[in-house]
Image (cartoon, rainbow, N blue to C red):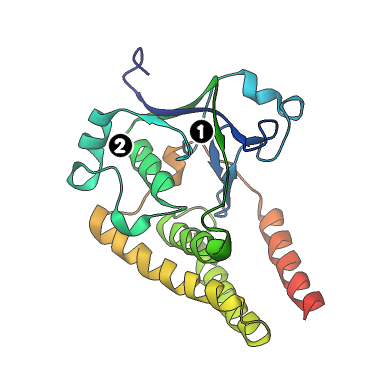
Amino acid sequence: MEGDDKIAAANGLIYLGDGWRIYSAGGYITDHWYFGSICWDSFEHECPGINKPHYVTYADGAYMLIKAEAIRRTCPDGKPFIDETFLYLDDILLILMLWDRGYGVAYVTVRSDLHYANLTTKPIINYYGIRANTALIMLLDTRFSWVKSFYLFRRGLGYKVLYLFNNEYYKSHRGFLDGKRLADIIVKRLGFKLDLYKAPHVREGIARLIFCLIIWYLIVYLRY
């Protein structure tokens, strides 16, 4: 990072709390709005990419380094995070802003950290995870944006129906609604939508998008 002005943030290899399985070698987002950690829950021999530095869609907030000057130049009011994005979105949003402004973000081959994931949020992880994912769908336009309205309608209706059968899905439905409201707040703060195609990402085919939708419906049908 000190040797390359364009690299604004990075994370190393982060392990889960057992010290053996990988939590993250950087984060990725697909162009049909799925995001996750590279090599999550894998062992080192199952993830040969960890031995080479590579660009990532986002550095994981569990343990990342970031240049303060890049934050001052890029972020609203010179602050790294928008307060309302706390949990499961703040780090992703920050890094996407950096990519949008021409910076790069990387994974480096340093064994850096243990992360005891979800210990605090486990009782409400569905709420925060769904809120973050819904906001990202709203914020990121991709080549699949022509199905975005249907995608969101299907998700909102699905959680509402599931809530009729299981009260646990109340948190999921509320997370979906709050995610839509959060996206509006972010757009007002930034003044623009983020461009996923300025960052490295996973390109998915239309067949996989259709496949994922079908699988989701089958799971709901077979479960209820």
Residue at the right extreme of this rendering: 222
Provide residue 139's location: percent of width, then percent of height.
40, 57
Q: What residue appears at the point 42 percent right and 38 percent down from the top-left corner?
A: 198
User: Disc number at residue 101?
Assistant: 2
Q: Would you call the spot at circle 1 few (<14 residues within 10 Å), some (14-19), or many (20 or more)?
A: many
Query: Which kind of residue does numbered mark 2 sit on?
Result: Arg
In front: 188, or 128? 128
| Location of residue 53 (image quadrant) | top right
Q: Would you call the spot at circle 2 few (<14 residues within 10 Å), some (14-19), or many (20 or more)?
A: some
| Location of residue 40 (image quadrant) | top right
Query: Which kind of residue does numbered mark 1 sit on?
Result: Val
Task: Name the quadrant of the C terminus.
Answer: bottom right
Question: Residue beneath label 1, please?
Answer: 56
Relative to 125, is 47 above or below? above
Pointers 2 and 1 in contact (C-beta within 8 Å): no
Q: What residue appears at the point 43 percent right and 30 percent down from the top-left corner?
A: 105
Is any part of residue 85 visible from this angle?
yes
Mark 2 and mark 1 lie on one chain; the one further toward the N terminus is 1
Q: Is residue 90 left or right of residue 46?
A: left
Residue at the bottom extreme of this rendering: 164
Provide residue 37's location: percent of width, then percent of height.
59, 41
Provide residue 64's location: percent of width, then percent of height.
43, 32
Residue at the left extreme of this rendering: 77
Q: Give the CA distance from mark 2 to mark 1.
A: 15 Å
Q: What residue appears at the point 37 percent right and 49 percent down from the top-left corner?
A: 194
